């Protein structure tokens, strides 16, 4: 009596067919995303930094900084100005290793990600910076204008307009002082 062997083979084949039916077919890559901006990464970063304004007459929260982190931030600014983007990124990454939840550091790193052409990372960093920050003032505007630029690069015009609207909402008058 050996009929059990053919039945087990049939069941094994049926199991393999069932598994094969569950796999996701490989699809061809979709069409390339058409950016909704012609701005260069350098122009984008200039726009982001310019959106901060001077903060005069509005609420702007400034945290107390760790001196080591502040040195790394200043080093990153000097390295970027000198054209050494990779070293500037390394300095900010080192600062983020020390204080990983600093909204200003996250924003500065997002701006360097834009300069590197890494728009996805820039968006993640800006969103995280906004979530951890005061959500008002110049830094808030930089977060949202970063997201506007990232969305424009992704061809998301409506999302970019929404981000611009959020940036406009970051302006909050400071408290009256008597």
Image: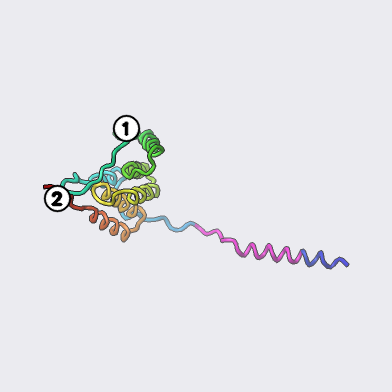
- Name the mark on residue 67: 1
Q: For residue 18, which quarter of the picture? A: bottom right
Residue 178 visible in the picture:
yes
Determine the CA span between mark 2 and mark 1.
Answer: 31 Å
Nearer to us in this view, 54 or 89: 54
Nearer to us in this view, 35 or 122: 122
Give the image location of residue 103, x and y in percent: 33, 45
Where are the magenta residues, as a range? 9-28
The correct choice, above or below, for 128 with respect to 14 in the image is: above
Q: Quadrant of the N terminus?
A: bottom right
- Callout 1 secondary element: helix
Q: Left or right: 12 with respect to 74?
A: right
Give the image location of residue 99, x and y in percent: 38, 39
Residue position marked by numbered label 2 in the rendering: 176
Q: Left or right: 75 with respect to 171?
A: right
Query: Residue farthest to the front?
Result: 178
């Amino acid at each position: 009596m050996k009929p059990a062997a053919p039945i087990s083979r049939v069941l094994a084949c049926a199991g393999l067919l069932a598994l094969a039916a569950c796999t996701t077919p490989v699809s061809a890559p979709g069409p390339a995303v058409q950016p909704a901006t012609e701005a260069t990464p350098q122009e984008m970063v200039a726009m982001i930094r310019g959106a901060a304004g001077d903060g005069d007459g509005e609420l702007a929260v400034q945290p107390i900084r760790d001196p080591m982190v502040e040195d790394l931030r200043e080093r990153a600014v000097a390295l970027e100005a000198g054209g050494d983007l990779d070293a500037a990124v390394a300095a900010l990454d080192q600062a983020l290793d020390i204080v990983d939840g600093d909204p200003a550091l996250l924003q500065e790193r997002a701006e360097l990600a834009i300069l590197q052409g890494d728009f996805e990372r820039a968006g993640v960093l800006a969103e995280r910076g906004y979530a951890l920050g005061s959500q008002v003032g110049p830094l808030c505007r930089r977060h949202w204008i970063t997201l506007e630029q990232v969305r424009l690069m992704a061809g998301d015009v409506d999302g970019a307009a929404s981000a611009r609207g959020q940036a406009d909402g970051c302006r909050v008058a400071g408290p009256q002082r008597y």
